[in-house]
């Protein structure tokens, strides 16, 4: 249980708010590269409380600027990508990638007016099939080259959803190991029962005997010992990390994935499920195989949460806590210590930026950023490649080419129509 | 739901208020006990305080 003020500090992400300022120190995925690969494409996005437009100009460069033209507030979502920037469709004002106005076609030729006109403009870079933005103070740190973004010989998929709740309650789910045996275990069995599916096929109901959390260079490593296991098992000995401040790494020997939570505003989060399918030993997957992009449904046509897949169950749990979870009425127990640890880590890093220091996970040395390997258990719950074995019960079931990916990873030869 | 009542107020190390929004004062429960996880943004002291309702000792066999 927290005070109202301390809850607000953790959950408010807009400019000028303490957490908003901390979060601005990091790079965020804002689109899949495939969404903006065509010259002239514009995508409207909202990140950290700011309405922005991402565009690809006629020089094939990506730009990210404020959605509103400084002239009369027209949305640049309908602008005209030019040779070097984005032009307002209303009166032709042209903004470069930094948001500086560089042309006002109907003003006097010698006017200096445009030099005093600037809208927000932010750095963007592409990596691993995603477009990332940096909205913090200069100089921008390195865009982290986490292993999954640069790993060779894997097949990638990108799922996404816009979640109507605050980013913190989504992150706290990742510091809560025991929800697995209930939300994704016993509750899933209940769903199976309702659907008439056999219940004994499900293996995620083992009871947690012990959970642990260790801070490390890139965040917090989450560990568990399940019934029938010891500390020798990979779930404890290796575990998997929460990468500070907004990512979960999870998977097994057959599929590694990131869950990336991008705060849009105080009550909405842009969520990515970024998965790398790992082929069986000796199989080489096609190098230019496309990265499929798919939306993960939150509710069905009756307005009910879709709860017959793991990520749908998570979304139900996140969203039903309310747009911003009221932590003044929560009742945490000992199994929630990971959540408390994460809250404290956020506060500690807030203090670091107040002291003029870089917070955790800011990388300035390019040599350190060539390939950042993260720990992750591969023998999951002592069941081997359990999660990849149930790819049809994960968000990946919505990937249009899932069957083909499974075939390719087994060594099959199929030609993609994705 | 009962109204939130903050029983702790000050850092045991430096005396600064733990109610400041940049510190963390997180109440939780360990079986019958009410516990407070504290982190002071002023001095960085981190610790837990458990409210004592009944004084017990291990069996002295």
Image: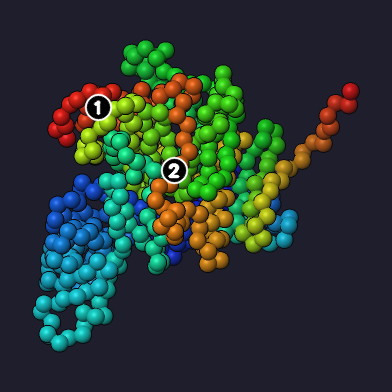
Residue A305 lies, in percent from the top left, at 33, 32
Q: Residue at x 17, y 86 (%)?
A: A111
Q: What element carries label 1?
A: helix
Write down the residue under mark 2: A373
Q: Which residue lies furthest to the right in this view?
A: B61
Residue A44 in view of the camera? yes
Which SS class for mark 2? loop
Kindly indicate whether the residue at mark 2 contacts the one at mark 1 (C-beta within 8 angstroms): no
Residue A36: x and y in percent read 19, 51
Question: What's the distance in space between the residues labelled 1 and 2, CA to CA?
Answer: 25 Å
Q: Is the residue marked by circle 1 packed among few (<14), some (14-19), or many (20+) residues within 10 Å? A: many
Residue A94: quadrant of the picture: bottom left
Residue A2 placement, left or right of A19: right
Q: Which chain carries label 1?
A: A
Depth check: A272 or A410 in front? A410
Q: Mark 2: give few (<14), some (14-19) or many (20+) Cα within 10 Å.
A: few
Q: Quadrant of residue A227?
A: top right
Chain designation of label 2: A
Sequence-wise first label, 1 or 2:
2
Judging by the rendered image, the residue that carries numbered circle 1 is A408
A174 versus A64 height, above or below: above
Q: Residue A152, percent across and down? A: 32, 39
Looking at the image, residue A3 lies above or below residue A274: below
Residue occupying the point 26% across, 69% down: A99
Q: How is the image coloured?
A: rainbow
Work out whether residue A331 can be spotted: no
Left or right: A145, with B32 as reference point: left
The quadrant the N terminus of chain A occupies is top right
Residue at 32% x, 27% y: name it.
Answer: A282
Residue at x 57% of width, y 22% of height: A229
Numbered marks: total: 2
């Amino acid at each position: 249980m927290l005070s109202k003020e301390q809850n607000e500090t953790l959950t408010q992400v807009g400019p000028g708010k303490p957490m908003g300022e901390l979060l601005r120190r990091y790079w965020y995925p804002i689109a899949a590269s495939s969404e903006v690969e065509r010259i002239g494409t514009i995508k409207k996005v909202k990140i950290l409380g700011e309405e922005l437009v991402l565009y690809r100009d006629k020089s094939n460069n990506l730009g990210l600027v404020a959605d509103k033209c400084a002239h009369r507030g027209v949305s640049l979502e309908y602008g005209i990508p030019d040779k070097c920037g984005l032009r307002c469709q209303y009166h032709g004002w042209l903004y470069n990638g930094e948001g500086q106005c560089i042309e006002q076609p109907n003003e006097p030729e010698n006017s200096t007016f445009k030099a005093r006109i600037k809208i927000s403009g932010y750095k963007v870079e592409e990596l691993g099939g995603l477009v990332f933005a940096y909205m913090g103070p200069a100089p921008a740190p390195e865009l982290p080259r986490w292993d999954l973004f640069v790993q060779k010989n894997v097949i990638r998929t990108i799922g996404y959803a816009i979640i109507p709740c605050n980013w913190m309650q989504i992150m706290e789910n990742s510091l809560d190991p025991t929800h697995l045996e209930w939300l994704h275990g016993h509750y899933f069995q209940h769903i199976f029962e309702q659907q008439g599916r056999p219940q004994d096929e499900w293996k995620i109901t083992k009871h947690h005997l012990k959970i642990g959390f260790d801070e490390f260079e890139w965040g917090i490593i989450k560990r568990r010992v399940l019934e029938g296991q010891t500390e020798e098992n990979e779930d404890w000995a290796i575990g998997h990390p929460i990468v500070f401040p907004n990512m979960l790494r999870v998977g097994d020997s057959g599929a590694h994935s990131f869950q990336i939570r991008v705060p849009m505003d105080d009550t909405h989060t842009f969520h990515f499920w970024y998965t790398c399918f790992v082929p069986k030993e000796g199989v080489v997957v096609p190098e230019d195989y496309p990265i499929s992009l798919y939306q993960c449904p939150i509710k069905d046509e009756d307005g009910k949460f879709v709860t017959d897949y793991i990520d749908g169950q998570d979304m139900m749990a996140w969203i039903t806590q309310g747009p911003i979870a009221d932590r003044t009425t929560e009742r945490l127990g000992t199994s929630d210590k990971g959540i408390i640890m994460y809250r404290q880590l956020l506060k500690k890093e807030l203090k670091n930026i107040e002291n003029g220091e870089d917070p955790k996970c800011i990388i300035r040395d390019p040599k350190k950023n060539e390939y950042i390997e993260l720990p992750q258990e591969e023998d999951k719950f002592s069941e081997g490649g359990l999660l990849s074995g149930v790819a049809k019960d994960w968000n990946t079931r919505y990937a249009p080419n899932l069957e083909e990916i499974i075939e390719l990873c087994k060594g099959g030869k199929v030609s993609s129509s994705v | 739901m009962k109204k939130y009542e903050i029983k702790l107020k000050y850092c045991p190390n430096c005396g600064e208020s733990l109610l400041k929004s940049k510190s963390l004062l997180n109440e939780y429960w360990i079986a019958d006990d009410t516990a407070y996880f504290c982190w002071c943004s002023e001095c960085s002291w981190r610790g837990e305080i458990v409210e004592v309702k009944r004084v017990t000792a291990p069996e002295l066999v």
